Image: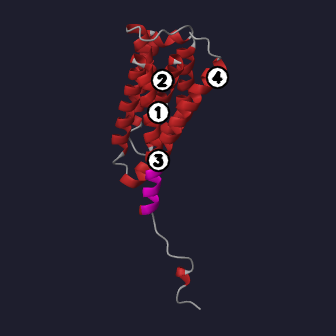
Amino acid sequence: MLSLMTAVGLAAPAGLNAYLTLLIVGLAARFTGLITLQPPFDILTNTWILLLLGLLLSVEVFADKVPAIDSVNDMIGTVVRPAAGAILALASTREIGLDPVLAGALGIVFAGGVHGLKATARPIVTATTGGLGNPIVSMVEDIAAAAAAILTLLAPLAGFLVVVTIVALLLVAVIRLRRRRRWFGPRRGPPGAARAGHP
């Protein structure tokens, strides 16, 4: 059960920031022993892979905070984030012998679901704040992803609960942002108003 919670607790944050979560797991496996990665997933502890993840993370941090560019970044993330979620779920359940197909699907569902909420919310944030809210929202997402991943490694149950809370908050945020966009969006008059005064 703890391994399943770890899988969810690591896969879901990848939906917010895949490279950050992979980097945290790779560093934790190499230097702390909080998680043991079996082959082939121990490649995440390789020095060159860690450097590559650090480089990709730097690009992600910049791209995700700039309006318009963040949308392109989310399009790329549609492939990268669910894939990272699958890798993390497979890596964290390898020791308990969970069916790889089930583990991979678990990672894809949670990472892909969180990514879907993120990608849905971001254009609404851009529209309602003129792009000014993007850097703030992106920074909060990065902090949430890092906190969830680290807490999951330290205490899987607590990390799982935090992930569930983050998903719930994202869902509520998307619903409220959609309502706000409709409220402040262009208002149209009642049907037939444009023809008022005409025979």
Q: Are marks 2 and 4 in contact (CB under 8 Å)?
A: no
Q: Earlier in the sequence, mark 2 or mark 4?
A: 2
Say which mark, if any, is on residue 174.
Answer: 3
Residue 18 lies, in percent from the top left, at 47, 27
Instruction: Name the front one of labels 1 and 3.
Output: 1
Q: What is the spatial separation of the Cα atoms under label 2 and label 4, in whole angstroms?
A: 16 Å
Q: Amino acid at mark 2?
A: Leu
Say which mark, if any, is on residue 164.
Answer: 1
Residue 28 lies, with reference to residue 119, above or below; the image says above
Q: Are marks 2 and 3 in contact (CB under 8 Å)?
A: no
- Pointer 3 local density, CA inside 10 Å: few below 14, some 14–19, many at least 20: some
Q: Amino acid at mark 3?
A: Val
Say which mark, if any, is on residue 102.
Answer: 4
Instruction: Name the front one of labels 2 and 1.
Output: 1
Q: What is the spatial separation of the Cα atoms under label 2 and label 1, in whole angstroms?
A: 12 Å
What quarter of the picture does the C terminus occupy?
bottom right
Q: Amino acid at mark 4?
A: Leu
Q: What is the spatial separation of the Cα atoms under label 1 and label 4, in whole angstroms?
A: 20 Å
- Pointer 2 local density, CA inside 10 Å: few below 14, some 14–19, many at least 20: many
* Horizontal relation, residue 91 to residue 123: left or right: right
Q: What is the spatial separation of the Cα atoms under label 2 and label 3, in whole angstroms?
A: 22 Å
Say which mark, if any, is on residue 10.
Answer: 2
Q: Earlier in the sequence, mark 2 or mark 3?
A: 2
The magenta segment is 175-183
Look at the numbered disc 4 and give the secondary structure of its residue: helix
Residue 191 lies, in percent from the top left, at 56, 77
